[in-house]
Amino acid sequence: MHKSMTRRLALAATLAAAATLAGAPALAQSYPSKPVTIVVAYPAGGDTDAMARLFAEKLATRLGQPVVVDNKPGASGTIGSAYVAKAAPDGHTLLLAPSTFSIAPLVLKGNKSGPAYDVLGDLAPVIQVGTQPLFLVAGASVGAKDFKQFMALAKQGGKPLQYGSPGSGSPMHILGEMFNKAAGVDIAHVPYRGVAPVITDVLGGHIPMTWMTLGPVAPYIANGKMTLLAVADAQRSKLAPSVPTLAELGVKDVDVGAWQGLMGPKGLPAPIVKTLNGHMNEILKMPDVVERLLTLGIVPLGGEPGRLAQTNAHDYQRFGKIIQAFNIQAD
């Protein structure tokens, strides 16, 4: 290439970079220029959907534009996630995703319906909004008032116990298989299409137990129809501090929690990420938001985008090995 042409290209690149930097503040100030959509890759009525509607209301006030929630369920959440991954990276289409986001493509590898997005590369992290500890929950029909009684039932001969999960490859399913191995039991997995039918069948005595976040079962814990026996976390949860960890009960190295994170398409400009992250960190400190999240069984978190990126990558790597070891596949 001729030297003069090389100089002109270098100058053009320098000017373009300078223009991008100069335009960054303007980009942040002009955002958003139209309504913002938060996609939830699951049906309306769940924890993620409830959070999305809470955040939409708060963000709309701060951004000066309507913020709407769009439910796009299917294929273990990959349909909605892929939709956002392919959206324009202008901050007007976002994804509020649970930790199943990291896992679903791993269990769908052999499935024609997925995976439709790259867990580590196709979405830009904005903020990890909270964590959700998973509890061992027994229905009243089991007759186990504590973990010791439950384990006695799990190890007795005859028909094995069953546990329900919101679907194959869900954090609850992975946790159930890890628990079986660590505790030396064989509790059969029964997959369902979501949280609600699991709870219905535990309440009805059709299955004795489940691994679940606190929000959906809290009313039944309060009225005695369900019992919390253990929490699968490294420490006791502030949501239920009287409930012992599995490690305290002698079941080691079984700590599987869930999380929720806000993301955008790959290439989301840094000024927009900064704007959204700043608003969300402030929203997560509002007393009414904190109260609502705790009611849903979610411990508010927040922080920089890198925290969500690190959590997502950790889960993808850790659970990838576990899913392979237990040969967990989607229904």
Image: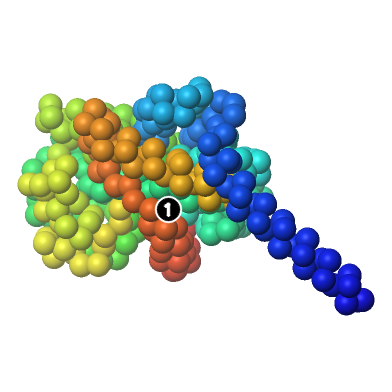
Q: Describe the colour scheme in one phrase.
A: rainbow
Residue 31 in picture, x, y percent from top left: 55, 35
Tell me where residue 2 sits by quadrant: bottom right
Secondary structure type for disc 1: helix
Q: Amino acid at mark 1?
A: Pro
Residue at screen point 15% across, 46% down: 238
Q: Is residue 32 above or below residue 239?
A: above
Residue at screen point 47% across, 54% down: 102
In the image, 277 versus 40, the foreground residue is: 277
Q: Is residue 36 above or below residue 176?
A: above
Q: How many marks?
A: 1
Q: Is residue 253 above or below residue 276?
A: below
- Where's the N terminus, which quadrant? bottom right
Rate crowding at label 1 as few (under 14), some (14 to 19) or many (20 or more) other CA atoms within 10 Å.
some
Residue 187 in picture, x, y percent from top left: 29, 54
Residue at screen point 77% across, 68% down: 10
Q: Does 292 sit left or right of 169 as displayed? A: left
Q: Residue furthest right?
A: 2
In the image, 130 versus 99, the foreground residue is: 130
In the image, 75 versus 179, the foreground residue is: 75
In the image, 111 versus 150, the foreground residue is: 111
Residue 13 in picture, x, y percent from top left: 74, 62
Q: Does 51 sit left or right of 209 as displayed? A: right
Residue at screen point 39% across, 38% down: 279
Which residue carries the number 1 mark?
305
Residue 58 in picture, x, y percent from top left: 38, 27
Q: Is residue 179 above or below residue 287?
A: below
Observer able to see residue 164: no
